[in-house]
Image: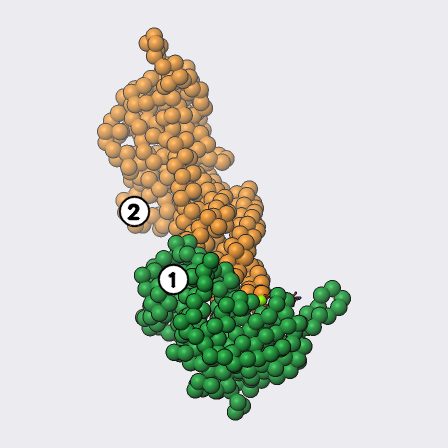
Amino acid sequence: MSLALSTLLYEWRRYMAAVVALAFSGLLVLAQVGMFMGIGKAFTAQIDRARADIMILSPGATALFNGGPSGVPRRIMPVVYQHPEVLAVADLDGSGGRWQNIVKDKEPGGDPAAPGAKKMEFVNVTTIDAMPGAVTVPVDYSDDLVEALRQPYAVAVDQTALGRLGVKLGDQASYNGKTVRVAAVTQGYPNMMQATVVMSRDTLRMLGEANTGERVGPLMVQIKDPARAPIVVAQLNSISNGQFKAWTRQDLAEANEGAMMKESFIAIMLGFSLFLGVLIGVAITWQTLRGAIMANIKEFASLRALGVAMGSLRWIVLELSFWVGIAGVLAAFVLTWGVSLLAAGSGLTMSFPPMMVMMVSLMLIVIALLSGLLSLGVLKNSQPADLLR
Amino acid sequence: MNTHTKVHGKHGDFAIEAKGLVKRFKTGRSWVEVLKGVDFDARHGDLTMVMGPSGSGKSTLIANLSGLLKPEEGRVDILDVDDLWTYGSGRIDKFRLDHCGFIFQGFNLFPSLTALQQVMTVLKYQGLSSADAKKRATTALEEVGLGHRLHQRPNALSGGEKQRVAIARALAKDPQILFADEPTSALDGENGQVVIRLLRRAATEHGAAVICVTHDPRLEAWADRVIHIEDGRILDDQRRTPDPDAQLASH
Ligand SMILES: Nc1ncnc2c1ncn2[C@@H]1O[C@H](COP(=O)(O)OP(=O)(O)OP(=O)(O)O)[C@@H](O)[C@H]1O
Ligand SMILES: [Mg+2]
């Protein structure tokens, strides 16, 4: 083991401040990246796991629901259906309203705090056609799930929203004043902004909220040969007359994710955090390294006396700061992991693309090395003549 | 190439020859002359002791001789080097790496390294492979009686043991010149005796020129030569016959 590494391991307390500073710099950036990517993924999940090969949205829309009108005029549906390769066309109907859980009377003497807290939330509603294999049914919905939603007034809620909505499987709840039943729980459809409730088109109709107007939601289209989706998309777009835009599923998912990161407030927040993280990281790591090197300055001076060149001592310091950087990266991972667990507990799933994680790790190591370079100056104090007194 | 001092000199050959050393320090607005034209020499195989009152310039003299502090005037011929102070600092470092050992009053050991690693570190900078460095370091530590302490860190060693690790670190390089500045003053009588005997042995058995600064007159018993310095001048220079079995009375 090298001198630098064993010094770091043995005198870790001395380097703790630097490692913690790096870890928080990393957390500052990683947690935000994770949050934004997680939100983006939640929105993209619906697109990724749709059965449709092609999706038709209003021109300019890049998301199925969030942000602006994404629907198209109802008369587009027969136009799309006339394409010889199209097998099925269905609109994604949706609604939204007030959700309240129904709190059962507690048995006397029961714990007054636990479960039954009253919850009131505004929820999104999306629909499926409750038939296995329908174009509006996501590919990861099991037949049992679809079957469960076929029952009148049955709804499905994502695992991550159960707590927020104050319900569990089998509970009844009130949606816009009407009683619905949580008949199924889905996995992997987190939504941090607003909880989503899935029901069948028929249930929505029974609730009196089905769309009968001139405009419908985005269209989900299935074609005979999914491999030909790009060609069919091009053909559909050539007859769109500016009234709609067709996307392959893949392209829409990418546009969706990209649009998320291009939101200027996200870029500004990330940029600012990055700046702050680097600034704080360098300042603290630099001062910590300086102090730690000063603490060993006599030992360094004795090496100088024995003829070890200044350049070699500089390498020791740089190696030391590299290892501090590595320790900082590991600590940042642990912290971020902890925060992401906390977040998951409250319904927000974070997502960490490997590329982003690598860039943040690299950033921390660069911060550490930069601090090492800045603290090289203290080595001037390693004067062996000072040991002769 | 100078002809007075030699690298692989026999016992009695000159290892260092310095002439007219003058060293001044600036204190405030005035200069203080700490060495006032010192002539000095030391021979292979000799334990040369430099004694004198506090502030007389003993440590400064050693710093000038070993290439750590440049004198204002004078020259230092050392081993095969003619006028050391004409060298650049890189070459002086290399010279010390190849030929010089140092022992200080403090032990200056890295807290994180075991005794073996302390000694190996310098050897590796000399270009030895890990295996060779380990072998040499083990031998050196055994020679100072620490064969059973190879894997202890400084916080598990006594003061005397720490100083012996520092001596092993200096001796493992097999230096032709060994500088020691008050090597025993942080130690009790018993440990001081161990240390001075090790220095004596470095001179006798390894043929090193050992230059030892001290203000402890009891150490004179082991010396081949005692030089007294006062106020930056050499007062006297006596040869004597060392007694390797002398006792440092412990009180
Ligand atoms: N870097 C320096 N700057 C200014 N003055 C110095 C410096 N180093 C040494 N001196 C002065 O030079 C004089 C001689 O110092 P030196 O360390 O050589 O003494 P010494 O003989 O080793 O004394 P001691 O026995 O106390 O160790 C002292 O008066 C000291 O104050
Ligand atoms: Mg001194």
Q: Chain of mark 1?
A: B
Dot 1 crowding, Cα within 10 Å, few <14, some 14–19, many 20+ = many
Residue nearest the observer in this picture, B128 or A351: B128
Circle 1: residue type: Ala
Q: Secondary structure at mark 2?
A: helix
Q: Which residue is mark 1?
A: B115
Q: What shade does chain B have?
A: green
Q: Can marks 2 and 1 be said to lie on one chain?
A: no
Measured as percent of width and height from the top left, residue A144 is found at 23, 29
Q: Is residue A383 above or below residue B127?
A: above
Residue at the location (56% across, 67% down)?
B215
Q: Residue B52 sits in which quadrant?
A: bottom right
Residue nearest the observer in this picture, A227 or B86: B86
Q: Which chain is orange?
A: A
Distance between mark 2 and mark 1 Cα atoms:
71 Å
Q: Which residue is mark 2?
A: A226
Image quarter where ligand 2 lies? bottom right
Dot 2 crowding, Cα within 10 Å, few <14, some 14–19, many 20+ = some
Circle 2: residue type: Pro
Measured as percent of width and height from the top left, residue B37 is found at 66, 80
Residue at the location (55% across, 73% down)?
B50
Residue at the location (34% across, 60% down)?
B149
Quick one: quadrant of the C terminus of chain A?
Answer: bottom right
Q: Secondary structure at mark 1?
A: helix
Q: Is residue A201 left or right of residue A35?
A: left
Q: Is residue B31 left or right of residue A47?
A: right
